[in-house]
Image (tube, grey):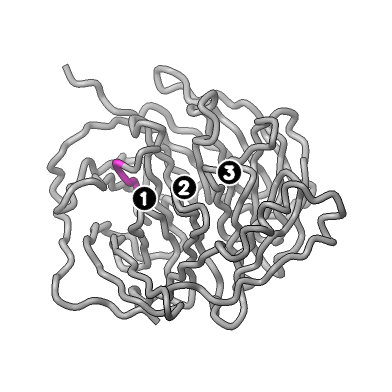
Amino acid sequence: MAKIMLGCEPVVGSLTPSRKRDYRVTNRLQEGKRPIYAVVFNFIDSRYYNVFATVGGNRVTVYQCLEGGVIAVLQSYIDDDKDESFYTVSWACDADGTPLLVAGGINGIIRVIDAGNEKIHKSFVGHGDSVNEIRTQSLRPSLVLSASKDESVRLWNVQTGICILIFAGAGGHRNEVLSVDFHPSDIYRIASCGMDNTVKIWSMKEFWTYVERSFTWEGLPSQFPTKYVQFPVLIASIHTNYVDCNRWLGDFILSKSVDNEFILWEPKMKEQSPGEGTVDILQKYPVPDCDIWFIKLSCDFHFNAAAIGNREGKIYVWELQTSPPSLIARLSHVQSKSPIRQTAMSFDGSTILSCCEDGTIWRWDTVATA
């Protein structure tokens, strides 16, 4: 278990917006009656940076952000199982660049949808319980990670349908895994967190030959020699409650629990003794009324800012490249009262989307200053 370094106190951001950027509501859509749990822009393919997807109930919907606040519906996929409730969606792509949507939820089955024809490309069965989050490796967008209630994380190849690695076992999570993320530049490294109050950092380095083999495997996906990764390189107990979101920020990690804040910290691994090491908590970003679980933050493409909603329907936008942390904007609207489960920041951060418990999608755009 990593030890928290004592000495320097973390720097806490002020809730007075300092680097003011004005956003205004430019659209509000009522998608349906069921909660919308996820919204995500396509950062995988530069042709589609203004395209986003949402999941709610058994539906995956694809939209495009157009000029003047317009949101155009491009397509909609409805799962055959009317009891499915999707919790997460991520963009990926095939070897030939075909955009794919990877969605998972209460059934534990991962649907890979071909965004070109709205048909199922593949279905991944393996998790023993619901899927809470799916993330794509931006360096190799055929690789996706899934975090599950079954206490495991799985690495999949959407091109070949293979489950390559399962992160679980002796050193694995002891409760639901709620969030997972690929390191932005170290292709071997991932982070996961969950209801056991820990964040775990894992390395795929010694298993990388299996990742490469998954691209050329010619047998049935079920015959692939899937490997278990049982021991993380670092286990961090920096929160005292569920950890429902973790995101890499370079070599640092942003994580949040149910404590009305998210934090930035630096993991320091001990190469000789896996699992141990130290954690240096650097900064804290307050988010009032953010004390319920399953609320996730998002960043723009270059990680300049993070946007996060709360249970009151408000959004806080924090600058990520400054110390002390500075609040860019606090967004609120008299009709936005429902918990915001997730936000999505556009490529340059000029558009922020939020998806809500009441089935609405909100679009905020920066106001051009004279």
In-image side of 94 versus 244 (left or right): right
Q: Position of residue 219 (x, y in %)?
A: 87, 53
Q: Identify which residue is drawn at 52% across, 48% down.
A: 38
In-front residue for pair 110/79: 110
Q: Position of residue 255 (x, y in %)?
A: 37, 62
Q: Identify which residue is drawn at 31% across, 80% down.
A: 3
**Residue range corresponding to the magenta coloring:** 304-308
Q: Which residue is mark 2?
A: 356
Decide whether residue 307 is among the magenta residues: yes
Under circle 3, the secondary element is: loop
Please give the label number shown on residue 309.
1
In-front residue for pair 163/103: 163
In-front residue for pair 292/284: 284
C-alpha span from label 1 to label 3: 29 Å
Q: Do callouts 2 and 1 mark residues in contact (Cβ within 8 Å)?
A: yes
**Disc 2 vs disc 3: which is toward the camera?**
3
Please give the label number shown on residue 140.
3
Q: How many marks?
A: 3
Q: Where is residue 124, by image quadrant?
A: bottom right
Q: Where is residue 154, by image quadrant?
A: bottom right
- Whichever of callouts 2 and 3 sits on the residue coming sooner in the sequence is 3
**Disc 2 vs disc 1: which is toward the camera?**
1
Under circle 1, the secondary element is: strand
Q: Identify which residue is drawn at 72% across, 35% down.
A: 114
Q: Identify which residue is drawn at 56% across, 38% down.
A: 53
Q: In which quadrant of the rendered image does the N terminus lie?
A: bottom left
- Does residue 30 appear in this view? yes
- Whichever of callouts 1 and 3 sits on the residue coming sooner in the sequence is 3
Under circle 2, the secondary element is: strand
